Amino acid sequence: MSLKSIVLATAIFLSTLYPAYANPTPTPHFRTEQEAQQHCPRDVVVWVNTKTGVYHLKGERWYGATKDGAYVCRNEADAEGDRMTRNGQ
């Protein structure tokens, strides 16, 4: 079995376990809330902590405030495997 076949088989296997691996195209990250809203006018813009993969809604404590983060569209964040904060902060 070639290295290319092994890598492909591994990628297929991982995509069944982790949906975030199924989409190799990264979610667009934006520096401003307005840029994100222009990208997805019918979706909710969230702030995702890019280190943890946890996102926050507008009005929550860490919305736009974590050291590593970006504004993204909620549906795209979900598709990427990010999750909403559990404690609402």
Image (tube, rainbow, N blue to C red):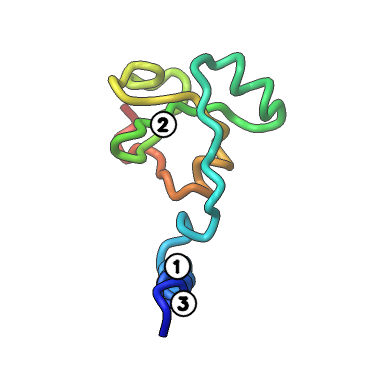
Q: Nearer the viewer, residue 39 or 63?
A: 39
- Density class for disc 2 (Cα within 10 Å; few <14, some 14-19, many ≥20) is many
Label 1 and label 2: CA atoms lie apart by: 25 Å
Q: Is residue 72 above or below residue 79?
A: above
Mark identifier at residue 48: 2
Residue 19 is situated, as x and y percent measured from the top left of the image, at 48, 60
The residue type indicated by label 1 comes to Ala
Q: Secondary structure at mark 3?
A: helix
- Give me the residue at 30% from left, 21% from top: 66
Residue 50 is situated, as x and y percent measured from the top left of the image, at 36, 33
- Density class for disc 1 (Cα within 10 Å; few <14, some 14-19, many ≥20) is some
Task: Provide the residue designation for mark 1.
Answer: 11
Residue 22 is situated, as x and y percent measured from the top left of the image, at 52, 60
Q: Secondary structure at mark 1?
A: helix
Mark identifier at residue 5: 3
Q: Is residue 58 above or below residue 77?
A: above
Label 2 and label 3: CA atoms lie apart by: 34 Å
Q: Quarter-wise, where is residue 73 in the image? A: top right
Q: Is residue 87 left or right of residue 9?
A: left
The residue type indicated by label 2 comes to Val
The residue type indicated by label 3 comes to Ser
| Quadrant (top left/top right/bottom left/bottom right) for the C terminus | top left
Q: Is residue 36 above or below residue 83?
A: above
Q: Earlier in the sequence, mark 2 or mark 3?
A: 3
Q: Is residue 16 left or right of residue 53?
A: right
